[in-house]
């Protein structure tokens, strides 16, 4: 009897050890499977981002400097009429600088002597005002510096201020709002050594992106519907970013800079509505 009881106890111990060993093995297998299934989630998250619908955000080009002399720069801006394809089924009559809608980026260096050839190819008078640029009054493109249709204006100035993002737009009496609404606006970048030394992203279209946000109304023919009432201009139902409808932008996984301009006529925007637009 004694030896039979001993055998039963020994068998129980062996069975317990086997159950414990199997449990440890099973737990290890489960944790391996769990970590594998977690890591598998990452590619599917990425594919959701790259599969975003809409239109690729358009980016204005940087206007080439026509003057090879160091410390000097010359640019040409042509205000012109054209057609822009915001919608797939119908082109919209628009205005632009050196193109059909909006204008190129004018990129200046601090200390640079700049000359700009402005040509008016519109059917009505215009001006080009450098909004935020510190220049003498007679180079500023205000309402008193009208450029008649078919003529030009050549302002000259030295860029004295620090790094900044500014913009240019028409500023003629009674046509400023309609000309901006039709598309006349562009950005000015000023570069200086301080901004450079701080490592701010500054590669246009790579890690430095302009976002010109505008509200617009379109009529049934997809033409701009500029509607002014006693209460002012009717806010636009449609948001364009850089003249792109329903835009998306893929950015690198790194520090990225957005230069956001609200170029809407009547609508005020906050940064979240600007970012929600893309
Ligand atoms: Cu202005």
Image: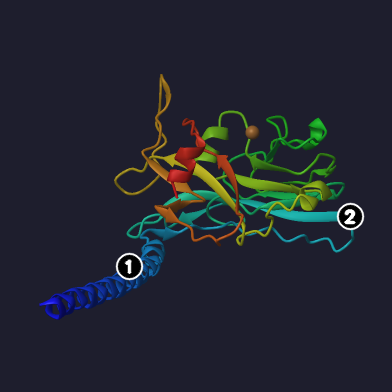
Dot 2, how many residues are within 10 Å of its Cα: few (below 14), some (14-19), or many (20+)? some
In percent of width and height, residue 126 lies at: 63, 39
Which residue in the rendered view is the most extreme toward the front?
2
Q: Residue at horizontal 83%, vertical 60%?
A: 67
Residue 255 coordinates in the image, percent (x, y): 61, 55
Residue under pointer 1: 34
Q: Is residue 74 visible?
A: yes
The residue that mark 2 highlights is: 71
Q: Position of residue 228 (x, y in %)?
A: 42, 28
Describe residue 82's horizontal placement relative to residue 103 as left or right.
Answer: left
Question: Residue 259 or 242: which is nearer the viewer?
Answer: 259
Determine whether the residue tagged by mark 1 lies in a helix, strand or loop.
Answer: helix
Q: Residue at x 53, y 33 (%)?
A: 177
* On screen, residue 36 above or below 179: below
The furthest residue to the right: 70
Q: CA distance from mark 1 to mark 2?
A: 62 Å
Q: Position of residue 198 (x, y in %)?
A: 76, 49
Q: Which label is found at residue 250?
A: none
Q: Nearer the viewer, residue 258 or 91?
A: 258
Tell me if residue 67 comes above or below residue 221 in the rendering. Answer: below
Crowd class of label 1 (few under 14; some 14 to 19; many from 20; radius 10 Å): few
Sooner in the amino-acid sequence: mark 1 or mark 2 = 1
The foreground one among 22 and 50 is 22
Whether tag 1 and tag 2 are in contact, CB under 8 A, the answer is: no
Question: Where, by quadrant of the figure, is residue 209 drawn?
Answer: bottom right
Q: Is residue 137 above or below residue 68?
A: above
**Name of the residue lying farthest toward the top:** 230
Left or right relative to 67: residue 217: left
């Amino acid at each position: 009897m004694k030896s039979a009881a001993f055998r039963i106890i020994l068998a129980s111990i062996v069975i317990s050890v086997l159950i414990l060993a199997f449990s440890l093995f099973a737990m290890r297998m489960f944790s391996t499977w769990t970590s594998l299934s977690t890591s598998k989630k990452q590619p599917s998250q990425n594919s959701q981002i790259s599969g975003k619908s809409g239109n690729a955000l358009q980016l204005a080009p940087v206007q080439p400097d026509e003057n090879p002399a160091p410390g000097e720069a010359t640019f040409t801006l042509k205000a012109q009429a054209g057609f822009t394809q915001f919608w797939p089924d119908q082109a919209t009559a628009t205005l632009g600088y050196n193109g059909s809608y909006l204008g190129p980026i004018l990129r200046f260096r601090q200390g640079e002597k700049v000359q700009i050839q402005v040509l008016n190819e519109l059917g009505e008078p215009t001006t080009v005002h450098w909004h935020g640029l510190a220049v003498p009054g007679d180079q500023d493109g205000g309402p008193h510096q009208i450029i008649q249709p078919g003529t030009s204006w050549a302002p000259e100035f030295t860029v004295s201020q620090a790094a900044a993002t500014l913009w240019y737009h028409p500023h003629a009496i009674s046509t400023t709002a309609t000309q901006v609404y039709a598309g006349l606006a562009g950005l000015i970048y000023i570069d200086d050594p301080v901004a450079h030394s701080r490592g701010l992203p500054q590669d246009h279209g790579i890690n430095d992106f302009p976002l010109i946000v505008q509200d617009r109304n379109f009529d049934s023919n997809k033409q701009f519907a500029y509607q002014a009432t006693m209460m002012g201009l009717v806010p636009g139902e449609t948001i364009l970013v850089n003249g792109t409808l329903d835009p998306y932008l893929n950015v690198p996984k790194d520090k990225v800079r957005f230069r956001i301009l609200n170029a809407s006529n009547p609508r005020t925007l906050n940064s979240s509505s600007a970012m929600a637009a893309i």
